[in-house]
Image (spheres, rainbow, N blue to C red):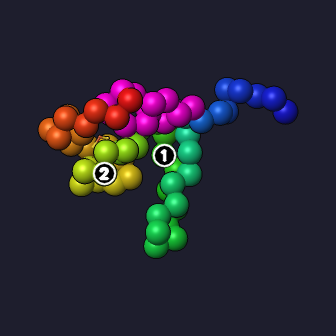
Amino acid sequence: MDNKNNLVVVKETPGGPYILTGEFRMIRKDGSEEMVTGPKGLCRCGHSKNKPFCDGSHAKIHFEQD
Ligand code: FES
């Protein structure tokens, strides 16, 4: 029951996205679902053109959130 190998891990990166590792279910606002296998970066700067995923735009805007 306590199988940590199945956990999704979320790691903050300074000045960058949250990095998700593991397999997770992505549910879009239109209700569609897909399984995604990380590592995947989730945008936290708000400038990605591929939200919710990071597209590297944080570097262009010099996002500095810790
Ligand atoms: S954190 Fe990378 S584009 Fe926003």
Frontmost residue, 64 versus 48: 64
Say which residue label 2 marks.
46
* Above or below, comparing residue 41 to residue 5 in the picture: below
In percent of the image, x 38 and y 52: which residue is there?
Answer: 52
Q: Amino acid at mark 2?
A: Gly
* Residue that lies at the very extreme toward the right in this rendered image: 1
Q: Secondary structure at mark 1?
A: strand
Q: CB of mark 2 within 8 Å of CB of mark 1?
A: no
Question: Pointer 1: what residue?
Answer: 36
Q: Say few, some or many: other residues with alpha carbon within 10 Å of mark 1 (under 14 / 14 to 19 / 20 or more).
A: some
Residue occupying image coordinates x 15% and y 38%: 60
Whether residue 1 is visible here, answered yes or no, is: yes
Residue at 26%, 43% in the rendered image: 55
Residue at position x 59%, y 36% from top? Answer: 8
Q: Is mark 2 within 8 Å of ligand 1?
A: yes
Magenta includes 19?
Answer: yes
Left or right: where 21 falls relative to 63: right
Camera-side residue: 19 or 37?
19
Within the image, what quadrant is residue 17 found in?
Answer: top left
Res. 56 in view: no
